Image: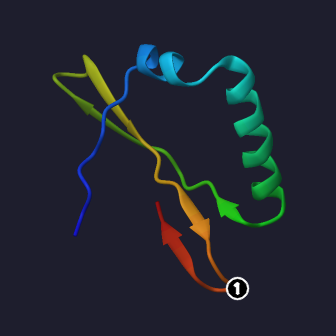
Amino acid sequence: MRKPIVLIKSSQIRQHLSILEAVEVMKETFKDLRAGKSLIPVRYVISVAEDKLNILLRPVVEVVGPEKIREK
């Protein structure tokens, strides 16, 4: 079953994640990327409303085994 897309405002992120926590998350993210534990797919840009609104989509995947990749 597909999960619905959740839209998160930057103000909501700031309420739940301090800048120090964000820096730590990014450190771990780059470590995983360097170790081959994650991938960064290409970002998709969809222009709508006569180019007045862009939807930016970037799927996140996690490597769960030597040849198994799971989309998050």
User: Which quarter of the picture shows residue 63?
Assistant: bottom right
Viewer-proximal residue among 56 and 71: 71
Residue at image location 50% in from the left, 72% down from the top: 70
Q: Is residue 27 left or right of residue 56?
A: right
Viewer-proximal residue among 37 and 50: 37
Q: Can you name the residue that lies furthest to the left here? A: 49
* Coloration mode: rainbow
User: Which quarter of the picture shows residue 8?
Assistant: top left
Q: Where is residue 14 in the image (x, y as percent from the top left)?
A: 53, 16
Instruction: Indicate the quadrant containing the N terminus: top left, top right, bottom left or bottom right.
Output: bottom left
Residue at image location 53% in from the left, 51% down from the top: 42
Q: Where is residue 71 in the image (x, y as percent from the top left)?
A: 46, 65
Q: In this view, does 63 lie to the left or right of 11?
A: right
Q: In this view, does 36 lie to the left or right of 5?
A: right
Q: Is residue 43 left or right of residue 67?
A: left
Q: Can you name the residue that lies furthest to the bottom here? A: 67
Q: Position of residue 3 (x, y in %)?
A: 26, 57
Q: From what the image shows, is residue 30 above or below residue 49?
A: below
Q: Can you name the residue that lies furthest to the top here? A: 11
How packed mark 1 is, by other alpha carbons closer than 10 Å (few <14, some 14-19, many 20 or more), is few
Residue at image location 64% in from the left, 60% down from the top: 39
Q: Position of residue 34 (x, y in %)?
A: 83, 57
Residue type, label 1: Pro
Q: Total marks drawn?
A: 1
Q: What element carries label 1?
A: loop
Residue at image location 31% in from the left, 32% down from the top: 7
Mark 1 lies on residue: 66
